[in-house]
Image (tube, rainbow, N blue to C red):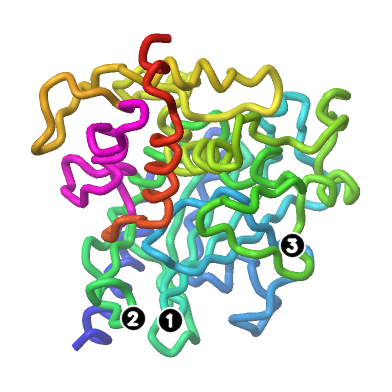
Amino acid sequence: MASCAVGAALAIAHGLALVVLIGLPAHANELTRAAAPLPTKLTDTDLYVPGSESVVRPGNLPFSPQYPLWSDGATKRRWLHIPPGTFIDGSRPDAWEFPPGTKVWKEFTHGRRIETRLIERLHDGTWRYATYIWNEEGTQALLAPAEGIPTLPVTTAPHGRYVIPAEFDCRACHESAAVPVLGVSALQLSPDRDPLAPHAEPLRPGDTDLQALVARGWLRNLPATSGDRAPRIAAPSPESRAALGYLHGNCGHCHNDNGSPAPVDLVLARRTVDDISYESILRSLVGVPARYRPHGMRAGAPLLDASRPETSVLAARMRSRNALAQMPPLGTQLVDNESLDLIERWIRQLPPKEANR
């Protein structure tokens, strides 16, 4: 029955993919290229060598961000491709400019490969997003419908089901950040990796980092000060560094000062240059009344109650799986207990006097 459901979803996907992309403007040759329909097969996105579903092309570089997004414990692999003869412009250290033709893939595995997502920069400068769903045998991945699949039966996934995000969901997270490519940045690829970062995957042989991108000529124009030291979150303790890194990787794409639509004056995205201070982050969190009151908490409860995680709205929303309350709001069914434990340890370290800053 599960195979039938998956097959039906993918059969629908083929038609919907063309419907979604049909009618896009074609004012010039470049725009016509940009509006070309997405491939219906993952193999046609140039991730793998021809004739293979597992051997990655040598020109697609694997990478692993040090502060990954929690995805219900899924194992993930990622690859970056930029067209030959082009480079990433790093002149703005926290908003790299990726050339048209850039592609980034991310594969999700729960016992078996379930989906591979693609982000691609088109020749008109815009970005497009796609998800490819693997069959149970792992022999083929086909394009998912643009509106996603709310419940895909996958026996190896949590609760036996898996959610394929809609294109709108992808845009909501990726396009709230300074750059839609969230995992390829100076901080995420820093060789000074955080040993306490929750769920950080160990670097595999060949994984690229900041230095490797520069050495290959893929990243240029970094400001001189950026090369003085490897990017690192400045914090008073190892737990504080890891906690801020988790918040950056899981929350900073929405809670930032880039004009994000998040209705909270909260900046959790970290910067590599002119970084906001640790004290500034505390001022935006500690003792600040939350706009949303989780069930069982008093009105006006603070986002972060120094030394008291049990009365901190931040921890309560991380712990909740209520669709109207949980944070992050998308992409998870399970509580991230490891990260929640880290955040609660960090909150306990904060002296109560911080609330009076």
Alpha carbons under labels 3 and 2: distance apart: 27 Å
In the image, what residue type sits under mark 3? Asp
Q: Secondary structure at mark 1?
A: loop
x 43%, y 9%: residue:
357
Disc 3 marks which residue? 207
Q: Position of residue 21 (x, y in %)?
A: 40, 50
Instruction: Answer with mark 3 or mark 2, whichever residue precedes in sequence.
Output: 2
Magenta segment: does it hold 319?
Answer: yes
Q: Can you give x and y, in whole percent of width and height, for residue 210 in the image?
A: 78, 45
Depth check: 333 or 178 in front? Answer: 333
Identify the image quadrant of residue 334: bottom left
Upstream in sequence: badge 3 or badge 1: 1
Residue holding disc 2: 156
Dominant secondary structure (helix, strand or loop) of the stretch shown in magenta: loop
Given residues 66 and 82, the one toward you in this image is 66
What's the magenta region?
304-332
Question: Mark 2 near mark 1, Cβ–Cβ under 8 Å?
Answer: yes
